[in-house]
Amino acid sequence: QVQLEESGGGLVQAGGSLTLSCAASGSIVSINVMGWYRQAPGKQRDLVAAIGSGGGTNYADSVNGRFTISRDTAKNTVYLQMNSLKPEDTAVYYCQYIGYVGSTRRDYWGQGTQVTVSS
């Protein structure tokens, strides 16, 4: 089992910045991907950004150039620096951890943290 502890959500004005953190603990494996998804009311949960254990990153088009994902491997923690926030970034943000062992993939999710951007 892997536990994920998220922090950093809150209320911010448009144009402002927030940083989300997600610390993983438990049965961490060396090959993994950590990332952030978000879900606005009435919408599906979509990928925001992800980073692999090798350092490769992937971003949604809507956040590319505004958000930066990074990780501290020693602390098993992933960060999402969000700049130039827009009201449409308002959502619950969920941390995801995917562990790969051979052909087995295991997904874990955090509880979610609310990000609200006021106009």
Image: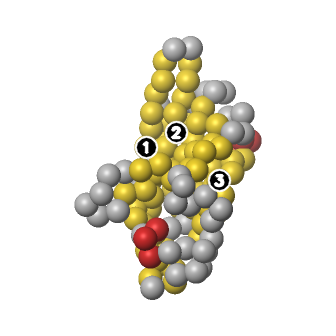
Q: Residue at x 45, y 33 (%)?
A: 107
Residue picked out by circle 3 = 69
Q: Residue at x 37, y 57 (%)?
A: 39
The amino acid type of the residue labelled 2 equals Tyr
Asked if residue 21 is positioned above or below residue 83 in the image, the reply reads: above
Cα–Cα gap, marks 2 and 1:
6 Å
- Please state the horizontal and vertical placement of residue 66, each as a whole percent of the image: 63, 65
Q: How many marks?
A: 3
- The reply to whether dot 3 and dot 1 touch (C-beta < 8 Å) is no
Name the residue beneath numbered marker 1. 109
In percent of the image, x 61 and y 58: which residue is there? Answer: 64
Q: Is 105 above or below relative to 98? A: above
Horizontal side, residue 88 vs residue 53: left or right: left
Q: Amino acid at mark 3?
A: Ile
Image check: 42 left or right of 29? left
Instruction: Name the spot of residue 100 as percent of width and height, x first.
Output: 55, 24
Q: Are marks 2 and 1 in contact (CB under 8 Å)?
A: yes
Q: CA distance from mark 3 to mark 1?
A: 17 Å
Q: Give the image quarter of residue 50.
A: top right
Task: Provide the secondary structure element on which disc 1 rests.
Answer: strand
| Residue positioned most to the left | 42
Q: Earlier in the sequence, mark 2 or mark 1?
A: 2
Is the residue 76 above or below the residue 87 in the image?
above
Q: Nearer the viewer, mark 3 or mark 1?
A: 3
